[in-house]
Image: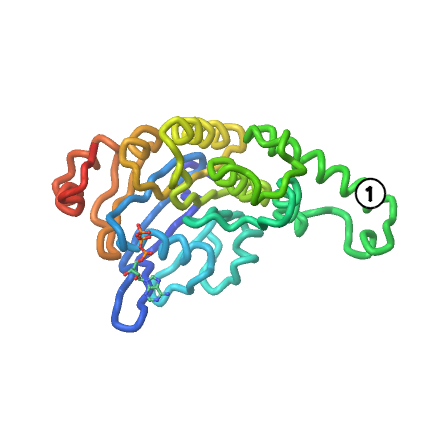
Amino acid sequence: MTQSTPLLKVDNAGIRFGGLRAVADVNVELFQGELVGLIGPNGAGKTTFFNLLTGVYVPTEGSILLNGEKLHNLAPYRITRKGISRTFQNIRLFGELSVIDNVKVAYHSLAKHSILSSIFRLPSHFSGEKEMDEKAVAFLKIFGLDRYKDEKANNLPYGQQRRLEIARALAANPKLLLLDEPAAGMNPQETKELMNLIALIREKFDLTVLLIEHDMGLVMGVCERIYVLDHGQLIADGTPEEIRNNPKVIEAYLGEEVS
Ligand SMILES: Nc1ncnc2c1ncn2[C@@H]1O[C@H](COP(=O)(O)OP(=O)(O)OP(=O)(O)O)[C@@H](O)[C@H]1O
C-alpha cells in the first residue's frame, strides 16, 4: 500500500437516531502509521463515530472502507478480524477473569489450534496454549502488567485496568487501534506514562491509532493530526497548531480551555 492509499477511508458517513443526526457527512482518512486525535465537546458524536467504525451501529449514510474493503454492514467480530480493535470509554474487562486470561480471550479466535484439539487435549492444544501464554505475557510486559498476570482483573488499580484494556485490544492484532478516552480517570503522571506508551506501541506494532481524548494538552502533545467533531459534523482537521488556532474550534469549545 502506498502512502496515498488510506488505511481507513470514511466517506460522508452518518447515522440518524430518529430525528437526531448524531453523526453526519463525516469524511476521514487515516494513513498507515498515523496517530490521530478525534476531539469535540460533550455529545459531539465521537463515540458514535467509533461505534460506526466497529459495526456497533450501521451507518445510515455514506461508506467506510478499510484497505479499500467495505466495512459497513459487517458484524463487529468480523470487523475485529479485518483489523480494527478498540477500547471503551467505560472499562469493559472480564473482571472475574485473570489478567492473562483477559488478554488470551482476545486472540483465541486467531489461535492456530482447533477447538477439537482443545476438547481432546491433543499435543497441538498444549503447544497452542503455551504459545498463547507466552504471547500474552509478552504483551503484559509491554504494559508493565506481567507481574499481575494471575490477579483477577477487578483487583487491579484503575489505571492498570485501563492499560490492560489496551493490551487486550492489541492482542487481537489490529491494523487500526481505536482508543476511547484511554486516560479518563487517570492522574497526570499515569496519563503522561500512558501517552508515552501509546506512542511506543504505535512504533513497535506498526499501528495506526485514532484517539478520542478530552485532555487537550494530551491530544495536542501526542497526535500528528486532529479531527474535530461538533454536533455530529466535522468542523476542522489539521495539525495540533492549526487546530489550536482554528476559530471554529475555539468557538465550539467556548468556555472550555483549548491549550
Ligand atoms: N443509541 C442512541 N440512540 C439515540 N441517541 C444516541 C445514541 N447513541 C448516541 N446518541 C446521541 O448521539 C449524540 C452523540 O453522542 P456521543 O456519545 O457519540 O458523543 P461524544 O462526542 O462521544 O460525547 P462524550 O464526549 O460526552 O462522550 C448524543 O446526542 C447522544 O445522545
Q: Quadrant of residue 223?
A: top left
Q: Position of residue 118 (x, y in %)?
A: 81, 52
Up-down relation of residue 10 to residue 136 (above or below): below
The crowding category of the residue bearing disc 1, from other C-alpha atoms within 10 Å (few below 14, some 14 to 19, many at least 20), is: some
What is the count of numbered marks?
1
Q: State which image quarter holds ligand 1.
A: bottom left
Q: Which residue is mark 1?
A: 126
Q: Residue furthest front?
A: 155
Q: Residue at x 76, y 42 (%)?
A: 129
Up-down relation of residue 18 to residue 37 (above or below): below
Is 133 left or right of 88, judged from the image as shown?
right
Name the residue type under label 1.
Phe
Q: Residue at x 25, y 42 (%)?
A: 237
Q: Position of residue 40 (x, y in %)?
A: 26, 47
Q: Residue at x 53, y 28 (%)?
A: 204
Q: Between 55 and 72, which is closer to the camera in this rendering?
A: 55
Is 22 left or right of 122, judged from the image as shown?
left
Scheme of colours in the image = rainbow
